[in-house]
Amino acid sequence: MNDTICAISTSMGTGAISIVRVSGNEAINIVDSIFDGNLIDKETHTIHYGHIKYDNTIIDEVLIMLMRSPKTYTTEDIVEINCHGGSSTTKKILEILLENGCRLAEPGEFTKRAYLNGRINLLEAESVNDLIVAKTDAARTLAINNVDGILTKKIRNIREKIVKILANIEVNIDYPEYIDEVQVTHNLMKDYIKDITNELQQLIEGAKNGRIVKEGINVAIIGRPNVGKSSILNNLLDEEKAIVTDIPGTTRDIVEGSITLNGVAINFIDTAGIRETKDVVEKIGVDRSIRSADRADLILFVANNNEKLTDNDLKLLEKYDSENLIIFVNKSDLEQKIEIPGNISREIIWGNTVDINGLDSLKNAIKNKLNLDNIVNKDMSYLSNIRQIDLVNKANLAIENANAALKNDMPIDLIEIDLKSAWEYLGEIIGDSYQDELVDNIFSNFCLGK
Amino acid sequence: MYDIIVVGGGHAGIEASHIAAKMGRKTLLITANIKNIGDMPCNPSIGGTAKGIIVREIDALGGLMGHIADISQIQIKMLNNSKGPAVRSLRAQADKITYPKNMQKALKNTENLTIKEAMIEDLIVEDNEVKGVITAEGERVYGKAVILTTGTYLKGNILIGSENTPSGPHGEARSNYLSDRLKDLGLKIIRLKTGTPQRIKKNSIDFSQMQKEEGDKKYWTFSHDYKASYDIDKQVPCYLVYTNEITHQIIRENLEKSAMYGGYATGIGPRYCPSIEDKIVRFADKERHQLFLEPESLYYDDYYLQGFSTSMPRDIQEKMVHSLKGLENAVITKYAYAIEYDAIDPLQINPSLENKVLKNLFTAGQINGTSGYEEAAGQGIIAGINAALKLAGKNPLILKRSDAYIGVLIDDLVTKGTIEPYRMLTSRAEFRLILRHDNADLRLREYAYELGTISDEQYKKLLNKKEQINKLLKYLQENHLNKQDKNIFKENNKNFPTSNISYYELLKRPEINLEFIKKLMPIDFSNEVQEQVEIMVKYEGYIKKAYKEAEKLKKLEEKEIPENIDYRKVTNLASEAKQKLEKIRPKTIAQASRISGVNPVDISVLSVYLKKEYNK
């Protein structure tokens, strides 16, 4: 009851704005820490303009409603973040909040708090009570059922590995005179942590796949103005959504559209041409494009066959050079003037939107890059909901802390604290997390005592 | 008419009667044999991991065990000294003659305390309220509160092979009827088992075949007030012995002759204290097991063979012992045996250690399902304190899990119950980082002062220590490194920090300790203040986190559940939760949340219900 909870309060799906609500003692502090304005000494029931930042990048431009206890829905401090609609931005903000100390609210929890804090009267509460309980119970069962057998097994295996290490450490502590037992040294711990990190990384990678299946992936189309980005997008989407003209710089807003490949949603993000500009309005668009490109899962770089690559093009190619880059040379129907520098090793697809050429190759390239055939055909045992992913990330963070403590030469029993929280987080995913398990393990695996 | 009657002169009874008398209550300690007060019927040691910290806590609260162990020990060492500060713990070999002697002397010198020799076989009870006790001879002794600390004496049965002898430990008379009487009065009786290994005659042991285990070359005391004065070079060593394939073969071939494997025993033994036959069966692939020979006393010749407890018949025990290297010609002075005894179900006990069924009845020690001298003494002191507080019309002292190991111990017992004798382990304490050996006084002496169980002088000492700690912390925070320090870093092969940090920040670095900082600036503080500060600074992150968790829990501890709550009326509780809650009847929401089978959802439901019905 005393922790700070957060949740997306508007319905999921694409709307103009979404609201993320945060309630609890730390609500103002936590939001303040990710907001570029200042909320700490602001008055209650005020609205503040600014940006949500993460790792120094702007995630979204937002309005923040600050409501101090007790005149709020839950009677606790509440902060509501009004951000742009669209599930990816909203979810990103939610994730940042979780990373910064909020807990994901259970269904109905805001109402529950309102009740427990005495804001809703008893008569009202009588009816709310059943609702809350039903919801939480169902949600819990649902959440646990969501994790299918294979995944549960995977998590259980990792937990088993961890609990064995924990039990070993405990035995070393409680029975120091038993020198025949393996002593968990810093060196040994290093190997253990490495092993667990690998296992968790696999889960996290899997979680990415899970999200791909559930939410699709983002492909940012970048390139100089007028190389035909919008036309490619329109052809892929098969509809006129982006504005296509011959004047450079008309696409100032991000246009999203999706196609389905192997059952996975591919969301295309058309960016305003990334180039240096003095036009203020255009600059906003350019900056925004850079941000969308930085966040995307894949980058589609479009060049014009009929022109030479500019310095700016080369810079962009360098900046986004990675496994996730696809180069599409457009206007293959025109005379080839483009020269591809020898140092570019990424896959290049030639085509044009006049006789519609190369688009299938493009789709195939996307499929291959993301390994979609594999992802969708596999056992599909991915963590896919935000609660599970949050918990695995927390477990991973705990292991990272353990590693840092190890490097700082902290005593093993302190390093163990983080190891133990990782074990507990993983237990929460599959719904079992209890202390006695550890004590049982000590006595079933070690032989000690008078 | 006494205020408080304590039945049993073991480690629980001692602390209970001593503290109650110290709190001004007219107290009577009744024991079957006055010479056995403070006896150590099993291992000749006090302390050990986690247990050593309990002894420190008893001392902080004004109890006897720490000081008596200090003046009776013949070897002492700090366990886990190379590990983190949270898991360090003292262990002493206590002389089995000196310890009881010193203890008896201390009790005789305790004001308000009378000692009487008798076997108690019955209680005087009116309307579920205990009014006194009745001896085997039929004498009625009246008291306002009774504390039972009967150890393994309730229907004790000693098992050696197929032999089954009704007896207390070492052939002492047992109580035949008291547990039946408790059962009639509505208590649930459980049967437990424990064991003790052989004692070996010193001059029949070839120590040259064994590895020596010495005490620390450093002074230690359990007590916060007593200054060590023993000769560190005259500590008596212990010895490490190993079992071998021949030992294992003897045991395997004779397994069905043991009381436990032959089916002659009914009690449940502790997992952490398995008999040697258990170890051989359960860990069949282990080539050897460690055993220790510990001296029992300077005044007689027995060595205690730790790790070799068994319920095999005597002739097999002879073969087993003689198979050990260095013990080929060993003379066994006492054979190992298992002992079964009656205990009460700890779920019927309140966190104050007062019984839920019988008013004014308190229990402590093995009767509550624990094992170990320290666990017994820890409960004893709380039972004594709470009986005294009750007579004074005050609220009981309930130590939180973040206050003390004693708090963890009692909470575990009354919340989870136990099916085997309960031993304290550091892993049972989720707040072990704040439940340290070094800070027992800081944790508990405020309580003790309020109770009147420590003197003004002891309290002043505490306040002074606190002040000194703050002073040193401030000093480290306010002073910063300067350039002259550079040379000293160089001389000591340490890297000089690039930025102008405070000594406080400097101390956080793994390669820096206060001893080194002393070279940079004058520090004139006692060792214990320095130790405290070093721990507080070096592990600040972890410690803060632990306190934060403890704080969270404290809020739940404050949410009390009314005693008359009817769980049947709480709709939406899962039926398992309802059953468990009904059985255990937790005092607070926090305690409820620790019951296995009670889920977070149930806790929410219960919270909502309390809010609605009681506005809590």
Image: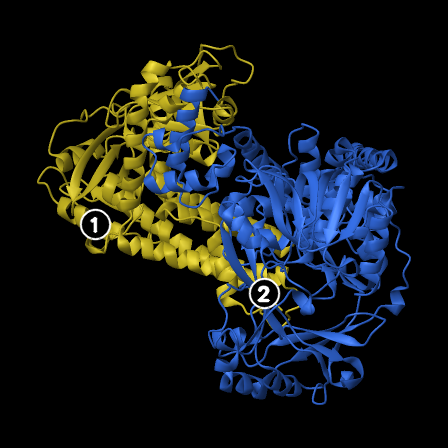
Chain colours: A yellow, B blue
Task: In this rendered view, identify the residue nearer to me: B20 or A41.
Answer: B20
Pick the quarter of the image with the N terminus of chain B. top right
Name the disc covering residue B220, or none: none
- Residue B200 visible somewhere in the drawing: yes
What is the secondary structure assignment of the residue under circle 1?
helix
Residue B105 in percent (x, y) is at: 86, 53
Task: In this rendered view, identify the residue nearer to me: B430 or B82.
Answer: B430
Camera-nearest label, 2 or 1: 2
Q: Chain of mark 1?
A: A
Measuring 29% from the left and 20% from the top, which residue is drawn there?
A: A127
Residue A216 in percent (x, y) is at: 24, 40
Left or right: residue B99 compared with residue B351? right
Give the CA distance from mark 2 to mark 1: 67 Å
Residue at the spot of label 1: A367
Relative to B521, residue A115 above or below: above
Left or right: residue B519 compared with residue B436? right
Residue B174 in percent (x, y) is at: 64, 62
Q: Chain of mark 2?
A: B
Label 1 neighbour load within 10 Å: few <14, some 14-19, many 20+ = some
What is the secondary structure assignment of the residue under circle 2?
strand
- Residue A300 visible somewhere in the drawing: no
Left or right: residue A330 compared with residue A387? left
Q: Amino acid at mark 2?
A: Thr
Measuring 56% from the left and 37% from the top, which residue is drawn there?
A: B549
Label 2 neighbour load within 10 Å: few <14, some 14-19, many 20+ = many
Task: In this rendered view, identify the residue nearer to me: A444 or A75.
Answer: A444
Q: Amino acid at mark 1?
A: Lys
Residue at the spot of label 2: B194
